[in-house]
Image (cartoon, rainbow, N blue to C red):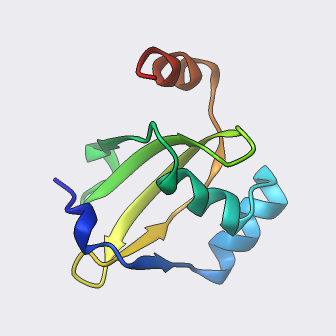
């Protein structure tokens, strides 16, 4: 379980940040924005959690863009480390809309 009161910011890898913009057209600001908009759906990602706990986040940007953002926590749970960010797929959009 994530203790959101402990999260103080974000940590970015330059390569991931460039990839998100180049491949998916998602900026750092857009990816970060979903964590401040309701609803935010977060689920564990056990398939990719062999070395560290990973999560999937589904949310909206300020402009209403629906994004899928896999992430992990760093710094004893204080920093969200975005792994990637892309537009939601059809099934993800349907799941997100059901929980609005």
Q: Is residue 1 above or below residue 92?
A: below
Can I make out residue 51 in this image?
no
- Residue 26 is left or right of residue 59, and the answer is right
Q: From what the image shows, is residue 86 above or below residue 7?
A: above
Q: Residue at horizontal 58%, vertical 80%?
A: 13
Q: Position of residue 89 (x, y in %)?
A: 63, 27
Relative side of 26 to 56, left or right:
right
Can you tell which quarter of the image residue 91 is in?
top right
Tell me residue 29's x, y (percent). Answer: 68, 66
Residue 51 vs residue 78, the one in the foreground: 78
Res. 6 visible in picture: yes
- Which residue lies most toward the left here? 1
Residue 65 to residue 31: above or below: above
Instruction: Say above or below: 53 vs 18.
Output: above
Q: Which sits in the foreground, 9 or 56?
A: 9
Residue occupying image coordinates x 22% and y 58%: 2
Give the percent coordinates (x, y) of residue 52. Answer: 26, 66
Residue occupying image coordinates x 25% and y 45%: 46
Of the pair 80 and 35, the residue shown nearer to us: 35
Question: What residue is shown at x 52% (from left), y 63% (from top)?
Answer: 83
Q: Where is residue 32? Give x, y as percent.
A: 57, 62
Quadrant in the rendering for residue 45? top left
In the image: residue 29, left or right of residue 56: right
Q: How many marks?
A: 0
């Amino acid at each position: 379980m994530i203790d959101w009161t402990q999260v103080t910011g974000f940590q970015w890898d330059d390569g991931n940040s460039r990839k998100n913009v180049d491949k998916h057209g998602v900026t750092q600001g857009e990816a970060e924005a979903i964590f401040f908009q309701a609803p935010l759906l977060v689920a564990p990602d056990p398939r990719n959690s062999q070395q560290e706990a990973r999560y999937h986040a589904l949310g909206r940007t300020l402009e209403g863009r629906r994004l899928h953002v896999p992430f992990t926590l760093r710094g004893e749970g204080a920093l969200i480390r975005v792994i990637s960010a892309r537009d939601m797929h059809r099934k993800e959009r349907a799941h997100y809309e059901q929980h609005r």
